Image: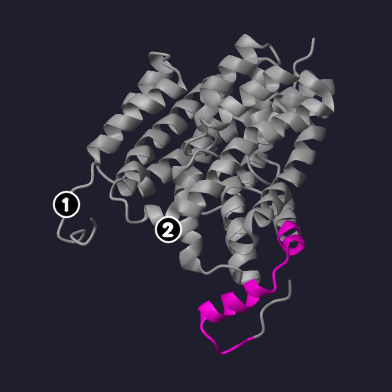
Amino acid sequence: MNQIPALIRVFAYLSILTVGGGMAAFPEMEELTVKVHHWLEFHQLIHLYSVGQLAPGPNMMMIVAIGDWAGGILGAVVVLIAFFGPTALLALIIGRLWAKLEKWPWRQSIQDGLASVSVGLLLAGTLSMGKGAVTGWTTGGIALSVLLIMLWRKINPALLVLGGAIVGGIVFMPK
Amino acid sequence: MNDAPATIGSEKEVVRAARSKVTVFDIFLQFLIIGATSFGGVVPYLREGLITKNHWVDDKEFVELLSISQSLPGLNATNMAVLLGDRLKGWLGAVAGIVGVCLPGAAIMFAVGIFYRIHGDHAIVTALLKGVAAAAAGLLLATVIQLGKKSLAHRFDLVFVLVTVLAVNRLHLGVPKTLVFVGLAAILFHYPRQTAKEGATK
């Protein structure tokens, strides 16, 4: 079955929901890619997103893998364009209008108002993802340790994710 | 692409001089390098590559563009690539920027996806991934807390944060409806107040 039109629709739609960051779209991404279209399973979505934290570049690149699974290499390309195209165009337009918007009194209101909603959306996405990632004492311990280290020290996050992999490997490896 | 010579001129002049020589290919190459090396978050690498190394923008403009990026949908990394590319060389610069910054990560995740599909069920891979996912969850929460500390303008904004979380995760209202309803309420809460400082705005 040809999944390309569905991939375009889903990822273009998810694109405009990423207010504040990619994670804002996560609950909707789970709904559409896992429950509606069955392109992958929930634990696979979490794994791909998490491994993506070890790759350089923008942090939602795991969508490429979803595109490939559902529609081959064309699916991967289509997903990239659908997910980054709409917001890129919007950024281009708003970026050019910005100087004019500077004098518009509601601009600051919109920025301040959206700030709280985008933090809320990111938190909601984080909790949805965390429910799948934190499943016991060990995973809870890893997540909490990373959280505390991040808040205490300035350290490259990719190193912490690598540390998580090592701890996971040691603890969960079948004997 | 060379480091700017140690001129005595002001930062603005250095930036102007550096900008006049930029080509679309320079932009593509610089963003490609950032896209291939920015482990753990793109923005610090953008700052390093564009301000410190190439002097294409100054600190003030960078911060301004970052604030635009944050209030628009889209990832910070890709919005910044578009905004910076556009300032440097128009829409072609924007295309060069976003394609460059996305290409390496996209190629890597394409390969990872294939590997994961074949080997994802191996006990070793599953064990490693459990740890990776837990660490990523902790990382995300830290990012949200840091962003909240930095961007929330008012103590009451925490209520909007909470309502947003409840609407999405408990009431399952969906992200778009939540965005519209809570977003509108929050924007109205921050309606433009006429203060002495803003007296000049019309």
Q: Is residue A172 visible?
A: yes
Question: A23 or B94: which is nearer to us?
Answer: B94
Q: How is the image coloured?
A: one colour
- Indicate left or right for B149 with A124 as reference: left
Residue at the spot 39% in from the left edge and 15% down from the top edge: B170
The residue wearing badge 1 is B194
Kindly identify which chain the residue marked by label 1 belongs to: B
Dot 2 lies on which element?
helix
Depth check, mark 1 against mark 2: the one in front is 2
Amino acid type of the residue tagged 1 in the rendering = Gln
The residue wearing badge 2 is A99
Residue at the spot 62% in from the left edge and 65% down from the top edge: B50
Where, by quadrant of the figure, is residue A77 drawn? Answer: top right
Q: Is residue A169 visible?
A: no
Q: Position of residue A137 (x, y in %)?
A: 53, 23
Question: A136 or A82: which is nearer to us?
Answer: A82
Q: Which region shows up in magenta?
A: B6-28
Q: Position of residue A133 (x, y in %)?
A: 58, 24
Dot 1 lies on which element?
loop
Question: B178 or B167: which is nearer to us?
Answer: B178
Quadrant placement of the C terminus of chain A: top right
